[in-house]
Image: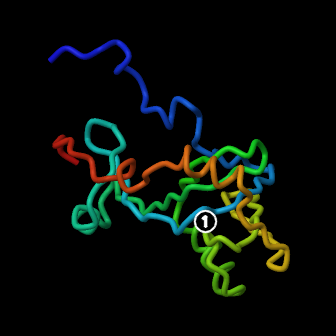
Amino acid sequence: MPVEWSDIGPPEWRARRLILTLTPGFRHTIRLIHRPVKFWRSVGVDGRSRIISTESAQKVAGEVPRALCRYAVNVIDRADQQVKVLEGPERLFMELRRCHELTGVELGGADAFDISIEVGAATIYRISYDAEERTPFMPREKEAIRMGMIDLRTVFAVSSVTTPM
């Protein structure tokens, strides 16, 4: 089936470079917008990465390549005030969970705070924050969220590709 030329290329959210890439040795300051979504990523025999169901992830547990548990959340990147997607491994989000447990604050809530993430050697994540310095969403941030938030349940939905794992 023919497509329009304008339909060719990456989805808009990738084209706008709205994936926050955590660079080792650099401190990234973010403000979470909501709770993260969980998904499983695996590489098929064709070498392509895809999102798979929890049931499929359980089936390939212990195999190589294995399914990796990943999480994603919309954030405001304080470096440029853009709404971006932070995708990362379970160990990064375990650090964010600890932050939530220690403070009792809903990290994506309206009255939460900024969080700084630094990636160290061997992909060790260091999280720092000041729970007393709340950063409620400002009107311009609310508008940016309304206009730029990515539907993560759609983006990280199970792949419909049937290529064997």
Q: Which residue is mark 1?
A: 92
Relative placement, left or right, of 31 versus 72 is right
Rendered location of residue 20, percent (x, y): 63, 46
Residue at point 34%, 38% (across, down): 48
Front-lying residue, 155 or 134: 134
Rendered location of residue 4, percent (x, y): 29, 14
The answer to whether residue 120 is visible is: no
Q: Is residue 69 above or below residue 148?
A: below
Front-lying residue, 135 or 63: 135
At label 1, the amino acid type is Leu
Please tell me in which quadrant of the rendered image residue 132 appears: bottom right
Rendered location of residue 155, percent (x, y): 39, 47
Say which element carries label 1.
helix
Rendered location of residue 30, percent (x, y): 72, 57
Q: Is residue 163 above or below residue 141?
A: above
Front-lying residue, 35 or 38: 35
Front-lying residue, 58 or 138: 138
Q: Is residue 87 above or below residue 32?
A: above
Residue at point 62%, 55% (across, down): 75
Relative placement, left or right, of 56 versus 28 is left
The answer to whether residue 100 is visible is: yes
Q: Is residue 13 above or below residue 142?
A: above
Relative placement, left or right, of 95 versus 164 is right
Residue at point 28%, 66% (across, down): 54
Number of callouts in the render? 1
Relative placement, left or right, of 19 versus 28 is left
Viewport quadrant of the N terminus:
top left
Residue at point 64%, 55% (across, down): 142
